[in-house]
Image: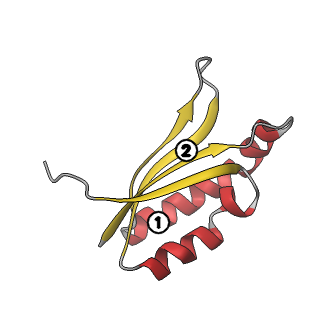
Amino acid sequence: MNQYLITAYDHTDEGAFERRLQIRPHHLDGARELKAKGNYVIGASILNEEGKMIGSSMILQFEDEEQLDAWKQNEPYITQNIWESIDIKPVRVADV
């Protein structure tokens, strides 16, 4: 499988954090589905100095780019305008 590091930062407009909190249960449901299918490796919220969520980091794995694209089209943090910037890089998780 191809592995990808996703690093995404939230919008910073007024109301952005509240939107994140509203959509978060749907995002986590999607992560659980990915885990059940073997596509989820690890994920975490990115926090600011006060401990407030300001973004996300995930390592996901898919058989091909089409599956990655399908995930992007269905990810609630993308479709509901939570993430302002998204960086996706191919990676290989060390087997240790």
Residue visible at 19% across and 51% down in the picture: 94
Mark sitting earlier along the chain (2/1):
1
Nearest the viewer among 47 and 40 is 47
Residue 35 % position (x, y) = 42, 62
The image quarter in which residue 30 lies:
bottom right
Q: As drawn, which residue projects farthest toward the right?
A: 14
Left or right: 88 as drawn, with respect to 80? left
The residue to which callout 2 is attached is 56
Query: Residue 21: x and y, percent?
Result: 73, 42
Mark count? 2
- Neighbourhood count class around disc 1 (C-alpha, 10 Å): few under 14, some 14–19, many 20 upward: some
Q: Residues within 10 Å of mark 2 (few under 14, many from 20)?
A: some
Secondary structure state at the residue bearing disc 1: helix
Q: Position of residue 66 (x, y in %)?
A: 48, 82
Residue 65 percent coordinates (x, y): 44, 78
Residue appearing at x 54%, y 35% in the figure: 46
Taking the view exactly as shown, the residue that stands out farthest to the left is 96
Which amino acid, by three-letter code, is at mark 1? Leu
Residue 34, which numbered label? 1
Instruction: Tell me how far mark 2 sits from mark 1, CA to CA.
Output: 16 Å
Q: Point out which mark residue 80 bears.
A: none
Residue at image coords 56%, 77%: 70
Callout 2 amino acid: Ser
Vertical placement of residue 2 versus 13, above or below = below
Q: How is the image coloured?
A: secondary structure
CB atoms of marks 2 and 1 within 8 Å:
no
Q: Secondary structure at mark 2?
A: strand
Q: Quadrant of the N terminus?
A: bottom left
User: Nearer the viewer's eye, disc 2 or disc 1?
Assistant: 2
Residue at the farthest top position: 50
Question: Can you tell which quarter of the image residue 2 is in?
Answer: bottom left
Tell which of 64 and 75 is nearer to you.
64
